[in-house]
């Protein structure tokens, strides 16, 4: 159930982050647009997607929370590796990226709870 529900959100997160990483590497000013306020709808969308699909494939609210944690951890790791390590000279390193990575994880989790709750209320 988890693999079926989380395969595409995780693959898509990787693709989105790689595209953004390339964009920041080519045009460093792009990174200044990636504020928490600007990214929150995207983070919520991925969480909602994961939470909704896990319930659709037979999960419950707890499964939706776990799905949100999985997608959030993937997002946080991508942020730390991509922006904290690879683009450390542009972003300021892991210590500068870590608070944002924790925020990304939390918002993905919130989105999964929203999506899972929505799917359960149908």
Image (cartoon, grey):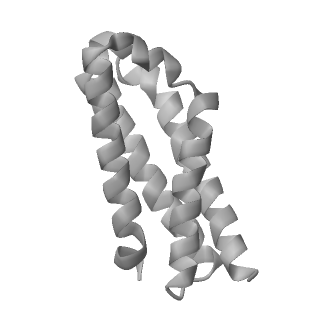
Q: Residue at x 64, y 66 (%)?
A: 115
The relative height of residue 20 versus residue 56 in the rendered view (above or below) is above
Between 93 and 79, which is closer to the camera in this rendering? 79
Q: Position of residue 117 (x, y in %)?
A: 71, 72
Which quadrant of the figure has residue 103? top right
| Number of marks drawn | 0
Q: Position of residue 114 (x, y in %)?
A: 69, 63
Which quadrant of the figure has residue 118? bottom right
Q: Is residue 27 left or right of residue 62?
A: left
Quadrant containing the N terminus is: bottom left
Q: Position of residue 8 (x, y in %)?
A: 36, 64
Q: Is residue 91 left or right of residue 45?
A: left
Q: Position of residue 35 (x, y in %)?
A: 56, 24
**Is there any visible trace of residue 14 in the rendered image?**
yes
Q: Residue furthest bottom?
A: 58
Q: Residue at x 52, y 31 (%)?
A: 100
Q: Is residue 22 left or right of residue 38?
A: left
**Is there any visible trace of residue 106 in the rendered image?**
no
The relative height of residue 22 versus residue 31 in the rendered view (above or below) is below
Quadrant containing the C terminus is: bottom right
Q: Residue at x 55, y 57 (%)?
A: 47
The relative height of residue 122 versus residue 99 in the rendered view (above or below) is below
The relative height of residue 106 versus residue 21 in the rendered view (above or below) is below
């Amino acid at each position: 159930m988890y693999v079926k529900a989380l395969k595409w959100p995780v693959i898509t997160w990787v693709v989105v982050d790689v595209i953004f990483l390339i964009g920041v590497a080519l045009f460093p000013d792009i990174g200044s647009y990636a504020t928490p306020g600007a990214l929150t709808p995207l983070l919520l969308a991925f969480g909602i997607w994961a939470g909704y699909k896990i319930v659709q494939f037979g999960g419950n609210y707890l499964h939706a929370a776990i799905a949100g944690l999985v997608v959030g951890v993937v997002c946080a790791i991508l942020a730390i590796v991509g922006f904290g390590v690879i683009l450390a000279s542009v972003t300021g390193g892991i210590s500068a990226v870590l608070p944002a990575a924790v925020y990304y994880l939390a918002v993905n989790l919130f989105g999964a709870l929203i999506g899972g709750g929505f799917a359960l209320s149908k």
